Each structure stands twice: as structure tokens, then as C-alpha cells.
Amino acid sequence: MTIHIPDDLARGLAGIAAAQQKSVEQVALDSLRSLFDRASSPQVVLRTVRALPHPSSAAVDDLEAAIASARLPVRDGGAFDEWPTE
């Protein structure tokens, strides 16, 4: 694949390449790869999520128990449903 870039951008890449003692192609590839390695890249986020370890069934049970113990009881009546009988 050939990508055509403006002359000023090519000169900028050449300057960066010379300073880093790399080829222009390597600097361009490194810069493009860094776009895909950012945390905001959907591909990187998906790769990271897929690499997470799966929780054990005991850990899931512990989480469900913690959620159940933190639930508040459901009340049928609201504060305005109870009127004084005086």
C-alpha cells in the first residue's frame, strides 16, 4: 500500500526520524500504531476486557450475596398514602 502525504508532513517526519535515528517509514508506523494503542480506542478497550480473568463462581456468589444484603425492603405505601384520622 502506498500513502501519499503532503510535502510539509513528509519533511516533519524526516526531521523526527533523523532525531530518533529511525527511518521515516518506522516513525510513521510507530505513530499510526500509537493511535490504536490509546485507551480510548475501542479495539484496545475490547482487547483489555477480553483479557480480564473470569471471576470464579464463588466470587459471583459473594457478589450476589452482598447485593442482596444491601437491598432495602419494598414498601407498598408512600409517605402521602397515610393520612391522619383526626
Image: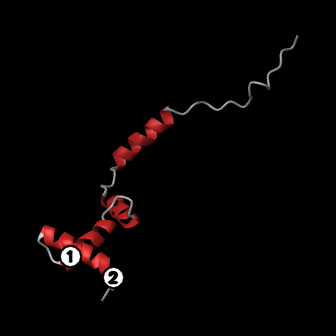
- The three-letter amino acid code for the residue at tag 1 is Ala
Residue name at image x 57 percent, y 31 percent: 72
Q: Position of residue 60 (x, y in %)?
A: 39, 46
Residue that extends furthest to the left in the rendered view of this protein: 21
Residue 84, by quadrant, is top right
Q: CA distance from mark 2 to mark 1?
A: 12 Å
Q: Work out whether residue 45 or residue 36 is closer to the camera in this orientation and state it.
A: 36
Q: Which residue is mark 1?
A: 14
Question: Which type of secondary structure does the marked residue at label 2 adopt?
Answer: loop
Residue name at image x 25 percent, y 77 percent: 11
Q: Is residue 59 above or below residue 18?
A: above
Taking the image as shown, residue 45 lies to the left or right of residue 67, namely left
Q: Work out whether residue 19 or residue 83 is closer to the camera in this orientation and state it.
A: 19
* Residue 5 marker: 2
Question: Which type of secondary structure does the marked residue at label 1 adopt?
Answer: helix
Residue name at image x 20 percent, y 72 percent: 15
Q: Is residue 2 above or below residue 64?
A: below
Res. 28 visible in picture: no
Q: Work out whether residue 22 or residue 39 is closer to the camera in this orientation and state it.
A: 22
Q: Position of residue 66 (x, y in %)?
A: 44, 36
Q: Position of residue 46 (x, y in %)?
A: 38, 63
Taking the image as shown, residue 46 lies to the left or right of residue 19, namely right
Residue name at image x 34 percent, y 51 percent: 55
* Residue 45 marker: none
Residue that extends furthest to the bottom in the rendered view of this protein: 1
- The three-letter amino acid code for the residue at tag 2 is Ile
Residue 76, by quadrant, is top right
